[in-house]
Amino acid sequence: MLRSTLLVAVVALANLTNGLHFYLRDGEQQCFLEELPKGFIVTGHYKTEEWRESDARYVENPAIGVTITADDNDASHRVMNQKGGHQGKFSFTAASAGQHTICVQAQGAQGGGWLSSSVVRFTLDMGLGEADDGGRAAIEKIKDIAQKINILNAQLEEIRTEQKYQLEREKEFEGATASIKRRVLYWAFIQLGIVGAVCYWQLHHLRRFFEAKKLV
């Protein structure tokens, strides 16, 4: 026969963590009550350790299985029925306000038989979280992130536009600089040509002058 122990705990309407441990035998069920607001999320982590006589201490036994159930007492509705290993976690959401019964049960094998003579130490850390708002908080957070991403994208687009403008200005400046250099070079050649022509004309004129004076 399953033996059941009932513990009563009333929790405040705020975030909290209940840490407790108790002792079970094979098939023994231990339950406790939680007064839960509607929509609040209950999460828990558990660990089991079996008493080993040869070591005179509690040790982990992966062969132990744990069943955790949660019932809405007012609605007579089971909101969670979870089977797990010797350690794990669970969570459920209170569909309505009121008392909820949470029960744990340990079963397993020791040396090929049931835990009929073994004692299991059950450690439970349970927390009451904020109300489940249907994901609105997550949606709002995603919207906020998306808005920030859009702002960053707009800023990046402005930076790209500015860089493109600066690149075009730089190309225009390089083009103007190259044009000026070409004009300076052309003018230098023209000046050189003029100077050469003047020198040739002066030399030619002097030669004719000297020939006319019969100095040459």
Image (cartoon, helix red, strand yellow):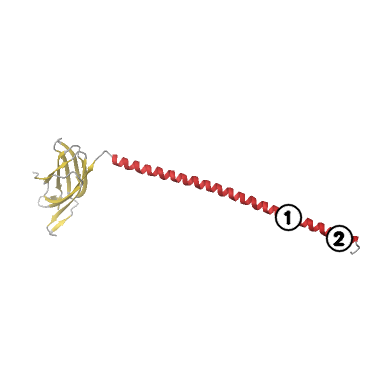
Report the front residue among 195 and 107. 195
Residue for badge 2: 207
Report the front residue among 131 and 50. 131
Q: Residues within 10 Å of mark 1 (few under 14, many from 20)?
A: few
Residue at (53% x, 46% y) in the render? 165
Please state the horizontal and vertical placement of residue 153, each as a whole percent of the image. Answer: 43, 44
Residue placed farthest to the top in the image? 75
Residue for badge 1: 191
Identify the image quadrant of the N terminus. Answer: top left
In the visual, does 91 lie left or right of 177?
A: left
Please state the horizontal and vertical placement of residue 120, each as a whole percent of the image. Answer: 13, 52
> What separation in Å lies between label 2 and label 1 (alpha carbons)?
24 Å
- Mark sitting earlier along the chain (2/1): 1
In the visual, does 125 lie left or right of 136?
A: left
- Helix, strand or loop at label 1? It is helix
- Helix, strand or loop at label 2? It is helix
Q: Amino acid at mark 1?
A: Gln
In the visual, does 1 lie left or right of 86?
A: left
Q: Residues within 10 Å of mark 2 (few under 14, many from 20)?
A: some
Q: Amino acid at mark 2?
A: Arg
Please state the horizontal and vertical placement of residue 43, each as a whole percent of the image. Answer: 21, 45
- Residue 189, image quadrant: bottom right
Residue at (65% x, 53% y) in the render? 181
Identify the image quadrant of the C terminus. Answer: bottom right
| Vertical order, 200 against 40 (above or below) | below
Residue at (38% x, 44% y) in the render? 148
